[in-house]
Image: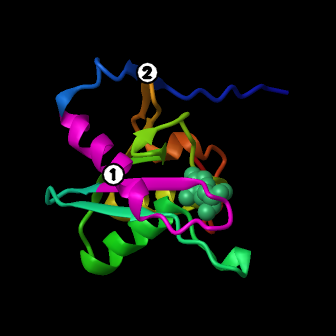
Amino acid sequence: MKEIVLETNIKVYTTAELPDEFKELAQSAISATSGAYAPYSKFHVGAAVLLENGVIVKGNNQENVAYPSGLCAERVALFYAGAAYPGVAVRAIAIAACTGGKPVGMITPCGACRQVLLETEIRGKRPVKVLLCGEMQTYVIESAASLLPLSFSSLGETN
Ligand code: THU
C-alpha cells in the first residue's frame, strides 16, 4: 500500500497586494457581474478570460427558467473566447461575484467549469492561471489542473 497526497499551491493576495499584471483582469471579472442574467438565483457572477494575444473576454452567468439550461459565468466566457478567437490560448481567468458593483465573498468554480478549464489548458498547451477575486483577498492558482486532481482522461492518464 502507498499513500498519495495531493497538494494545491494557492497564493493569497490582499486587494492592495495584488500584482499589477492581475489588476485589469480582476477588475474585468468584477465589472462583468453587471451583465449577469440571474433572476432565479439572484447571484451575479462575472468571469474574465485573458488570451495570449492580450484580449480580455468577459462572461457572466446566464440562467433559464428550465434551470439546467443556464450556464455559469466561467463557461460563458471560456466558450465565447473559443468561438470568437479559435486557436488562441488562454493565459488566465478571473472570477468574481458581486452585489452593487463590489465583489462579495470569494467563489470557486463548480466541477463542470473545472473540467472545461482543464481542457482549455490542455488545448492551449500552457497553464491557465485562476484568480478567485473576493472582497478582501484574491487567490491565485497557477494552473487549472490543480483544481481538478484525478481528472477523467479517455487515454487512461491523469494528472
Ligand atoms: N455560478 C457561476 O456562474 N459560477 C460559479 O462558479 C458558481 C455558480 C452561477 C450559476 C447560477 O446561475 C448561480 O451562480 C447560482 O448558482
Determine which residue is flagged by label 2: 12
* Residue 154 image position (x, y, % from top left): 63, 68
**Local secondary structure at mark 1:** helix
Point out the residue furthest to the left here: 53
Residue 114 can be seen, yes or no = no
Q: Is residue 77 left or right of residue 110?
A: left
Q: CA distance from mark 2 to mark 1?
A: 21 Å
Q: Identity of the amino acid at label 2?
A: Val
Residue 59 against residue 9 in the figure, above or below:
below
Residue 142 against residue 30 in the figure, above or below:
above
* Residue 80 image position (x, y, % from top left): 36, 74
Badge 1: residue crowd in 10 Å (few <14, some 14–19, many ≥20): many
Residue 22 can be seen, yes or no = yes
2 or 1: tag closer to the N-terminus: 2
Residue beneath the point at 85% across and 27% down: 1
The magenta region covers 21-49
Between 46 and 79, which is closer to the camera in this rendering?
Answer: 46
> Is residue 38 in the magenta section?
yes
